[in-house]
Amino acid sequence: MATQGESTHSCWSCGAMRAAHFCEACGKVQPPAPADYFAFFGLPRKLNLDVAALEKDFYELSRKLHPDLNARTDKREQEWSLEQSSLLNDAYRTLKDPIRRTQYLLQLEGVELEEQSKAATEKARATGEAKKQIVPPDLLEEVFDLNMQLEELRMHKKMGEDDPALIEEIGRQKLELEEKRQALLNELQADWKTWDGLIGREQAGQLVSEDERKQARDKMVDLLNRRNYIRNLVRDVNEALEN
Amino acid sequence: MSYSDKVIDHYNNPRNVGSMDKSSADVGTGLVGAPECGDVMKLQIKVNPATNVIEEAKFKTFGCGSAIASSSLATEWVKGKTVDEALSIKNMDIVKELSLPPVKIHCSVLAEDAIRAAIGDWKKKQESAKPVAVEAR
Ligand code: FES
């Protein structure tokens, strides 16, 4: 897997045709080629990926690219292996995590989450209408209400009071939140499938319209937005219950 | 990250924290969120029906210090303004006043959104209260 991709260049040291990261013939580390994290591992931009295989590749590459390998006598090669190693670490950390992988792909595809929100604000200004909220209003209500309860709980605790009913209520909401979080992950898997299907068709030489791509992207953006709120709530609920 | 003195001041002594009766005809409520970070902000205004002046403003924000400061400042600014004047407040005005760094700009956007949402809610109430459109648009 790791040896696919850019094998069109020749090795700076022995002149043989090389793989992306090190020469297949003499094993020397090559200067890092500008590549995204998927390409770094020789992967297509698909989201459903074999994490076990990725891990295996990661360890193998780590070993081969390691800057401390004593065979590295050339100073340039030392530097390159340092650069490649840090690139490798970033790429691995990003790709192995489902959420970060999705965020990264969207970013590669030119989606700027922050920009979206700003654009919506600008539109609201121009039209004089209220901004269309990016997440459903009832989710915002829920987030707000639960936060109010958490605040109450914190206050009670600070004053040394016990409020079993409130704790129980928050505990119940916590379970619901965890279910929601799981549901989001399942939904994400479905969105991945849609996206990967498009990439698969492209790989097979079929035409995929920008509209289709955009639809698949928008679904993931929407999901990630909702997820941020759920993530914060889970974090805050746990904190409030523990302390 | 270091906050400016003004942010810290608003954060430690937030102005106008609280809430008003959501169902009152004179009250407009805006509940908005920043999807980037998952923070939420509620801002309410109470408008004098005769003059369209915002007489009271309250907020409650669950979010970072900049968001709290931005909404606190926003309630101060809208008070005493007419609804239309309040609509001219831009997030960049807040950024300047509080010297927010670029990564905190979205927190000020949240405050502008909240003002706009609250006013929008209030306007909707007025329109449904008086079937004869008073406002020429
Ligand atoms: S970090 Fe999100 S509102 Fe400030």
Image: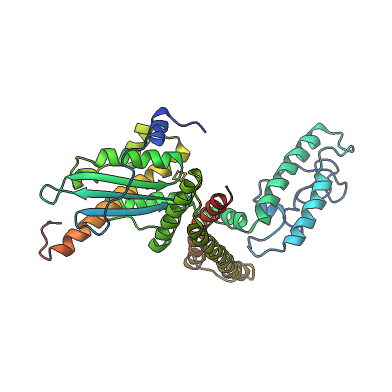
Q: Report x, y in % for residue B71.
A: 35, 42
Question: Does residue B107 show up?
Answer: yes
Q: Is residue B21 left or right of residue A200?
A: left
Does residue A128 appear in the picture of this structure?
A: no
**Residue B66: which quarter of the image?**
top left
For the C terminus of chain B, give its image quadrant. bottom left
Which residue is drawn at the image coordinates 33% and 55% (left, top)?
A131
Relative to A88, residue A98 above or below: below
The quarter holding residue A43 reads bottom right
Relative image position of residue A53 (x, y in whole percent): 77, 61
Q: Residue furthest front?
A: A161
- Camera-side residue of A90 and A202: A90
Q: Judge from the rendering whether residue B1 lies leftward or rightward of residue B71; answer left or right.
A: right
Q: Quadrant of ligand 1?
A: top left
Q: Position of residue A35 (x, y in %)?
A: 66, 49
Q: How far from the left and from the top, in percent, is residue A221?
A: 50, 59
A143 and A136: which is toward the camera: A143
* B30 left or right, relative to B130: right
Q: How is the image coloured?
A: rainbow
Of residue B55 and residue A197, the one placed in the foreground of this image is B55
Please tell me which residue is depicted at 52% across the width and 33% down the height of the picture.
Answer: B1
User: Going 51% across and 52% down the picture, which residue do you hit?
Assistant: A162
